[in-house]
């Protein structure tokens, strides 16, 4: 496989072309504070000068934004806030919630696993939590967003399959990644 390098600002061109999508990723993964634009620029700076492979350019750019947003969260916010357990879900009162309204840890676990299709292990390493916590947060997020969780195989109680009950029309993640 021939490797290309970043001659002529290939990374910058990709970030300009995919600016709105990369900014959405940053918005979803930033906890409370922080500029999505600054996060995207941090990711670009991290990649600038590194080898560019056309087939993996967008994946690499997205990964850099994910890492920059999560790093920003851990630097600017007490880490216990990021890994604190979510409160109980009151389904009667709240109804399905859009992804953007979920507690940060649930939103991040769900977005990385279900939208960006990161592995369970990769998600756990990025979020600095256990694999079991990734599953728990992902399950809570699905419940808050209106998924009914069913087990499909009696012998494997950990195998969960979501069934969509309702979806918020204003969820950025679904609008961009369906």
Image (cartoon, rainbow, N blue to C red):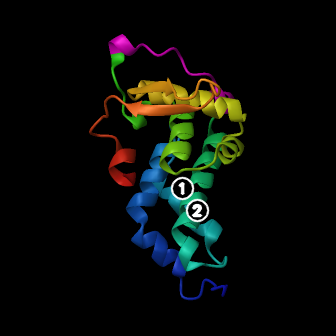
Residue 132 numbered tag: none
Q: What is the span of residues highlighted in magenta in the rendered image? A: 79-93
Residue lying at 46% horizontally and 59% vertically, measured from the top left: 22
Residue 11: tell me if it is visible: yes
Of 52 and 140, the residue lying toward us:
140
**Which quarter of the rendered picture does the N terminus lie within?**
bottom right
Image x and y of residue 44, in percent: 56, 67
Does 82 appear in magenta? yes
Q: Which residue is mark 2?
A: 43
Query: In 3D space, how far apart are the residues under numbered discs 2 and 1 (Cα atoms)?
Result: 6 Å
Image x and y of residue 76, in percent: 63, 41
Circle 2 packing at 10 Å, graded few (<14), some (14-19), many (20+), is many
Residue 145 figure quarter? top left
Q: Does dot 1 land on a helix, a strand or a loop?
A: helix
Q: Does dot 2 land on a helix, a strand or a loop?
A: helix
Does 157 appear in magenta? no
174 lies above or below 37:
above
10 lies above or below 121:
below
Residue 82: tell me if it is visible: no
Residue 39 numbered tag: 1
Residue lying at 68% horizontally and 48% vertically, measured from the top left: 122
Circle 1 packing at 10 Å, graded few (<14), some (14-19), many (20+), is many
114 lies above or below 63:
above
Image x and y of residue 98, in percent: 36, 34
State if disc 1 and disc 2 touch (CB < 8 Å): yes
Residue lying at 67% horizontally and 76% vertically, measured from the top left: 50
């Amino acid at each position: 496989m021939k490797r290309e390098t970043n001659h002529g600002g290939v990374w910058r061109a990709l970030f300009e072309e995919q600016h709105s999508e990369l900014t959405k990723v940053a918005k979803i993964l930033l906890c409370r504070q922080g500029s999505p634009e600054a996060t995207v620029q941090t990711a670009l700076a991290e990649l600038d000068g590194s080898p560019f492979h056309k087939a993996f350019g967008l994946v690499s750019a997205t990964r850099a934004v994910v890492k920059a947003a999560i790093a920003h969260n851990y630097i600017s916010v007490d880490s216990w806030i990021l890994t604190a357990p979510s409160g109980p879900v009151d389904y009667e009162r709240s109804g399905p919630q859009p992804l953007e309204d979920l507690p940060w840890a649930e939103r991040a676990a769900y977005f990385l696993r279900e939208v960006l299709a990161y592995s369970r292990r990769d998600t756990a390493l990025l979020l600095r939590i256990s694999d079991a916590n990734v599953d728990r947060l992902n399950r809570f997020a699905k419940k808050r967003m209106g998924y009914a969780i069913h087990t499909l195989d009696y012998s494997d109680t950990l195998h969960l399959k979501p069934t969509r009950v309702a979806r918020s029309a204003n969820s950025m993640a679904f609008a961009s990644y369906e």
